[in-house]
Amino acid sequence: MLQYHHCRSLDSAVYGRVEASPEHADQDFKDAYSWLEKEVGFYPLFLAVGTTDEDIRMTGYQNQWRKILSDGPNDVLFSFEKVEGVFMDYGYWHLVLNSSHKNYQMTDYEKRLIFKPSWPKLKWLKNVEKKPSSVQLVTRSLHLPDAKRVRVRNQQTKKLLEFRGFENVEVRRIILEEPDRY
């Protein structure tokens, strides 16, 4: 079952291992990522956890259709069956993102809300079934060729990735927003 998803630009979709790097991080989040690095012991690569399109939307893959394609991003979604890392409650990640006013000094209680250290992996996976887009995972690195499915926005990108050696590449768009269910 494919339940770990990572989105990155086509330019950075290399056939091999990728690692997160502060040099390529969004400037607005660098301090939060540095805090997380101190907590987990490595600079983070983020993955959405879950099996639904709602979970996949956490990666931002759908945002490439918000812009005019001629100058917009060309993103690739890599989906994996297994990834080792640290689970986090996405609903509490904002505590870190909004903590610059206190120099990213998080209380033990806030850390427990984010990391839920008493939860085994199975509980994290059950939680995401009940509450889609609620769990993210951070890892040190990813071997992109291990992806069991690769999604791209067009045939040209599909052919380019297959030329690089990737398999299981499919053209697939996901809708920008989930329609109201009422």
Image (tube, grey):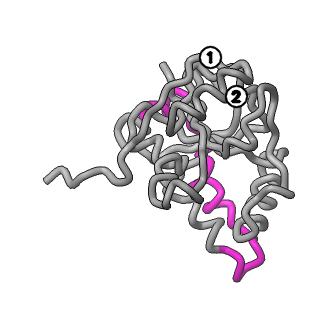
Q: Which dot marks residue 77?
A: none
Q: Which dot marks residue 167?
A: 1
Q: Is residue 120 something one can see in this rendering? A: no
Q: Quadrant of residue 76?
A: top right
Name the foreground residue: 38 vs 2.
2
Q: Quadrant of residue 28?
A: bottom right
- In this view, the mark in front (1 or 2): 1
- In the displayed structure, 120 sits above or below 71; it is above
Name the foreground residue: 70 vs 85.
70
Q: Please indicate whether residue 1 sits to the left or right of residue 114 in the image.
A: left
Which image quarter is the C terminus in? bottom left
Q: Residue at x 78, y 46 (%)?
A: 40
Name the foreground residue: 34 vs 119.
34
Q: Residue at x 81, y 29 (%)?
A: 17
Q: In the structure shown, which secondary structural element does the residue marked by tag 2 occupy?
A: loop
Range of residues picked out in magenta: 99-127
Q: Please indicate whether residue 10 sits to the left or right of residue 1 in the image.
A: right
Percent x, y for residue 10? 67, 41
- In the displayed structure, 159 sits above or below 47; it is above
Q: Earlier in the sequence, mark 1 or mark 2?
A: 2
Q: Which residue is mark 2?
A: 84
Q: Is residue 108 magenta?
A: yes
* Three-letter code for the amino acid on which mark 2 is drawn: Glu
